[in-house]
Image: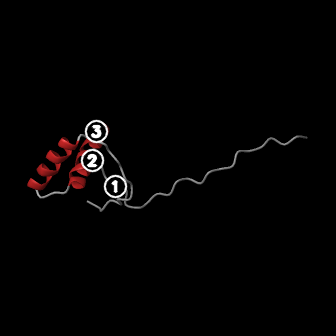
Amino acid sequence: MPQEKRTARLTVLIDPRKKAVFERLCAEEDAVASQVVRRLLRRYIEERLGKAWVPEKTESKPAPRRRPRIARRQ
C-alpha cells in the first residue's frame, strides 16, 4: 500500500483513565497510539464507504477559486 501523507492533525479530548488504558494496550501490541488511531479511522472509513481505502497516488490540488462575475451595466 502506498505511503500516505500525514500532515493533518486531529485533536481529541478523552478521559485520562481511558487514555492510559488505551496507551497500555497499544504498547502491549508494540504500536504507538497514533498508529492504532489511524488503523481505527481507516476501518471506520472503509465500513462507511463499503470499499477499501486506497490513498491517491498523486496529490490533487484544489481547484482554483473563480472570481464571481459582475454584471455590467449597459
Please give left or right for residue 72 compared with residue 5 in the image: right
Name the residue carrying label 2. 42
Q: Amino acid at mark 2?
A: Arg
Q: Amino acid at mark 1?
A: Pro
> Label 2's element?
helix
User: Cα distance, mark 2 to mark 1?
Assistant: 11 Å
User: Cα distance, mark 1 to mark 3?
Assistant: 15 Å
Which is in the foreground here, disc 3 or disc 2?
Answer: 2
Q: Are marks 3 and 2 in contact (CB under 8 Å)?
A: no
Screen quadrant of the C terminus = top right
Label 2: few (<14), some (14–19) or many (≥20) C-alpha neighbours in 10 Å = some
> Label 1's element?
loop
Q: Amino acid at mark 3?
A: Gly
Looking at the picture, tell me which residue is in the foreground, 31 or 15.
15
Q: Are marks 2 and 1 in contact (CB under 8 Å)?
A: no
Name the residue carrying label 3. 50
Name the residue carrying label 1. 55
* Residue located 37% across and 56% down the image: 56
Please give left or right for residue 47 compared with residue 9 in the image: left
* Residue located 24% across and 44% down the image: 43
Looking at the picture, tell me which residue is in the foreground, 23 or 47.
23
Please give left or right for residue 18 compared with residue 9 in the image: left
Residue 28, numbered circle: none
User: Cα distance, mark 3 to mark 2?
Assistant: 12 Å
Residue 6 location (% of width, % of height)? 35, 59
